[in-house]
Amino acid sequence: MAEVLLNKGKGNRNREGHPWVYDNEIASVNGAVKPGDIVSVIDSGKNLIGKGYYNPQSKLTVRLLTNLDEKIDAEFFHRKIKNCIDYRKKFGYTENYRVVFGEGDFLPGLVIDKFGDVIVIQTLSLGMDKWKPEIVAAINDLLKPKGIYERNDIPVRKLEGLEEYKGFLSDPFDTTFVMNEAGVKFNVDVVEGQKTGFFLDQKENKLAMKNIVKDASVLDCFCYTGSFSLQAAQFGARQITAIDVSESAIAQADANARLNGFENNCDFKAANAFDVLPQWVREKKLFDVVILDPPAFTKNRAGTASAARGYKEVNLRAMQLVRSGGFLLTFSCSHFMTPDLFFDAVYSAAIDSGKKIRQVEVLAQAKDHPVIWQIPETNYLKGFLLQVI
């Protein structure tokens, strides 16, 4: 096995648990190695830091799979994926959940989602892509799904020298179906839906609405296919107004409302929140509950300042639209908006809106998207349930 020798002073972060080794941290590569091969990572004192897969085309040249001197083979992946499933079972996940959350499960570059008896996988790196046959074998043995589909139509693969594509990893099956989450039915399309077909990371945060939306008027911004809206309707919301800039997402949200019999109290509109919220403030519209679950406003560090302004603006308008004593449910899904930066943006919005804020709950990604303290990149979803006074 080839060895990757690190520069002097490098490797402490990896020894503590972070899996990424950057190209500028490497002093030399000793031995024959091909892109995607497993290598040992050695510090300048000749101590083993761990083993992982190698790709000289990527700035993340090595991604560690283990800090131990152990063999990386089919049994390794079977054991690791079984550990992921066992962890989820402890928290009651059985039907629809993220089975593997990449770095959050110490399997960098691998995502596995379960929708009933359908599995969707993503291999986001060359090293993980090479182990796909072993991963599929482990999935079949441990979960015995009806079918497996891969959604590798992801631009990040290009950074690894990989093509984008999608397709079956099992016998073909019906890729559109209905799933049930907390009593609400959703149409799922694992071929054309975003990411793997459905966002699973907000499942527990939607339950936070249970005690505040009954008989309430609700505004759901960036509603996508209506996940928060329909959960609010399930909890007894009187009227839900929901907006998203995507007309196709609104059409899917409408279909989901009809699927649940909620079409009479859900009004989905194709609109840009940054345009309509200021207009509704001028019209003095008020809602009992406002939900903000926007897409990431930045996907890199350079865009953080601009993103912070965007989060402040949309939260400011949302607070102005909340009836006094009502509630705001607000989120950021950008890793680069750290918890402190997101708090500052929401706090600044409260000051400028002249509103007092009572914190009800701090929210985060679901337990099947675990956060590793030594890997800050795993902590991406931040949120607050706030009373606006």
Image (cartoon, rainbow, N blue to C red):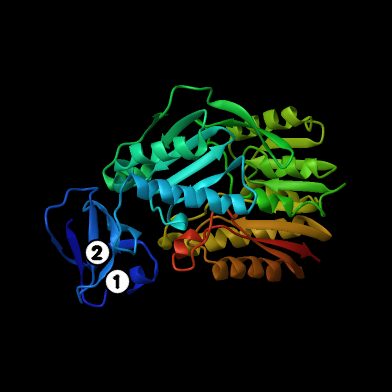
Residue at the limit of the structure toward the left, as seen here: 31
Q: Identify whether 181 is placed above or below 293.
A: above
Q: Secondary structure at mark 1?
A: loop
Residue appearing at x 72%, y 37% in the figure:
184
Q: Residue furthest right?
A: 215
Amino acid type, label 2: Val
Nearer the viewer's eye, disc 1 or disc 2?
2
Label total for image: 2
Q: Report the side of 98 relative to 6 (left or right).
A: right
The answer to which quarter of the image holds residue 117 is: top right
Q: Which mark is residue 41?
A: 2
Q: Nearer the viewer, residue 31 or 359?
A: 31
Q: CA distance from mark 1 to mark 2?
A: 9 Å
Q: Secondary structure at mark 2?
A: strand
Q: Residue at x 44, y 22 (%)?
A: 171
The 10 Å Cα crowd at callout 2, few under 14, some 14 to 19, many 20 or more, is many
Q: Which mark is residue 333?
A: none
* Chain-order first, disc 1 or disc 2: 1
Question: Which amino acid does the dot numbered 1 rest on?
Answer: Gly
Quadrant containing the C terminus is bottom right
Q: Nearer the viewer, residue 14 or 117?
A: 117
User: Quarter of the image containing the N terminus?
Assistant: bottom left
Q: Are marks 1 and 2 in contact (CB under 8 Å)?
A: yes
Q: Position of residue 35 (x, y in %)?
A: 21, 48
Rendered location of residue 365, percent (x, y) = 59, 56
Can residue 278 be seen from the camera position used here? Answer: no
Residue matched to label 1: 11
Residue at the spot x=26%, y=43% of the render?
161
Residue 55 drawn at (x, y percent): 24, 52
Q: Looking at the image, can residue 217 be seen?
A: yes
- Position of 52 relative to 147 (above/below): below
